[in-house]
Amino acid sequence: MRSDKIVIGARRIGEGEPVFIIAEASINHNGSIKRARQLIKAAAATGADAVKFQKRNLEEVYQKKLLDNPNSAEQKYQYLIPLLKEFELPDEAFVELEKYAEELGIIFLVNGWDVKSVGWIEDNLHIPVHKVGSPDMTNDELLEVIAATKKPMIVSTGMSREEEIDHMVLLLQGLGTKFALMHTNNIYPAPFDEINLKFMDRLRKYGLPVGYSGHERGIAVAIAAVARGAVIVERHLTVDRLLEGPDHKASLLPEEFKEMVTSIQQVEKSLGDGQKRFIRIEQMNREQLGKSIVAKTFISDGTVITRDMLMTRSPAKGLSPQRMEEVVGVIAPRDIPAGEALMEDDLTADEILQTFNGHGIPLKWGPVVRLREDFERYMGFEPKVFEFHLSDKDLDEEVPQGKFQQEVVVHAPEYMHRLYLNPATENKEERQIAIKTLQRSIQVAEQLAESFKGPAKLVIHPCGVTLQPATDAAKLLEIFVDTLQQLKTNNVELLPENMPPRPWVFGGEWVGNIFLLDEEIKRFLNQTGHKMCFDTSHAALACNAAGYDLIRMVRELKPYIRHLHVSDASGIGDEGLQIGEGTIDWAKVFRELEGYQYTMVPEIWQGHLHGGKGFLQGMEHLRKYWQ
């Protein structure tokens, strides 16, 4: 059952929203305003959304005889009541603390334990939601008073029977109150085998937001609660677990609370939406580790393929082994050497390789090729440019020679042996390798320019990629500037390329820190005098990650673009998609690019396979935007 949502200030709380995290300061200030301020500061530093204190009018909470003589009752009252008297903050302290929390940007909450306290809170503070602790879940009088404020409520359900929860839910729903339920176990600290997180599933039957308020040791259970769907998490916070008081032993220290917040955010990201997706980095790993159907022996053109002619081998660049039965019985459309993978085109003829031509394409387009590839096979498609994407081994290869009418762009290698080339790295040895590799790439570009039309362009990744977000991204950009200044260009135009927020680095999740959005890129280009290679896929991913407008980015950077990489994108990690497979609005992009006179390539991932079919399909998909 999908639950309703409640609104706390500017935050919506419920399924599909970020988990709302409350740091429960309770009475862990021990009556000290200074310590209460420390708790607020610590809560804000951990990344919690709210910090919550408690307020009681003891005469309204306890019977007079208990207050007059706690020793007349059980030992628990002899312990607790004197502490509550000692620890209760004066009214003016809450006003001061609310102002301090506002300065630190954290929501300030106070849990009123009685009708008078709730009235004082409403008259003197500005809290956006009322929290009802487990002891008052059955207190209809208090619930009715809070409901009359018309503010949402968060109600803990510990220390109660299920029929009492039913009663409370019906009461609040009848009063028209928006509220959320919290599963909790009111033992301080709670034993793990008594927590019973699965009861959260029962609470969802009411169709309300469900959260978790914990009193156990450590942070594992709170994280597990988020994985089970908790949309609110509340944990006690203390600055010293050795202090006197009922809650300190079940509280987290600031560093523990911060770790919990970070872990919850990581779990939130990992939950997804339950739909199976095959992301690009997984595809790269699958290609490396998976298998394809390959020819076990030489299969001549026109031969009927039998099972004993086939086997499976890595890499997974061809047909999946699951399609073995589809291949058996097919008449081979070409000579297939032993060990070569069978492709989709071996099952069905694709006419695009026979029908495509570049006539009518207004841009100087062309394919991405390799030095050792037969790039001249594309000549019949009328390309105006070739982009040679170099690998580390290509730097020692002979370059093609001849007289060709196409312009030439060279893409510098991204790896040198097992090292990801990073011209913005703070590691001096790695940067020297990057500089030497880029200088050698410039020489290759210069040699290619002798056989092609006009001066060559060299596309360079600024990189600046780290495992964790860089603490000083501006420094990485300064290092990249220095790297470019050390290069001898030899009449080759250097074009830094905009980066994605989550680059591919031998697979896995890395962080792009520089050259992401237009303001930073424009400052860099104006400072250095360079122009750029604009990658539509990288730009879309960076804009998605930052909540930024891609069309504005295209508009702002158009004057600086001298080469285009065109492919689609989705989310913040799926790059190099075929045109139309992602979320880019191509009509708007090319409206902004109207009048662009320079080169472009369809940089579709694996577009070079099957005779370059992916590149040609990309150009066909784009053709309608140029009509």
Image (cartoon, grey):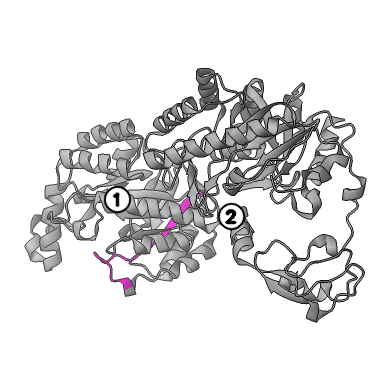
Q: Type of residue at label 1?
A: Glu
Query: Around disc 2, counting alpha carbons within 10 Å, would you say few (fewer than 14), some (14 to 19), or many (20 or more)?
Result: some
Q: Is residue 337 left or right of residue 256?
A: right
Toward which corner of the image does residue 626 lie, by quadrant? top right
Magenta stretch encompasses residue 152: no
> Which mark's residue is nearer the viewer, 2 or 1?
2
In the picture, which quadrant includes the C terminus?
A: top right
* Above or below for 508 versus 388: below
Start and end of the magenta stretch?
A: 176-192
Magenta stretch encompasses residue 187: yes
Q: Type of residue at label 2?
A: Ile
Residue 281 - label: 2
Residue 293 - label: none
Instruction: Identify the residue shown where x is 64% and y is 26%.
Output: 552
User: Which residue matches tag 1?
Assistant: 24
Front residue of this view, candidates 48 and 33: 48
Query: Around disc 1, counting alpha carbons within 10 Å, would you say few (fewer than 14), some (14 to 19), or many (20 or more)?
Result: many
Q: Secondary structure at mark 1?
A: strand
Front residue of this view, candidates 288 and 19: 288
Q: Is residue 138 visible?
A: no
Find the distance from the CA under tag 2 to the CA under tag 1: 40 Å
Instruction: Identify the residue shown where x is 91% and y is 49%.
Output: 354
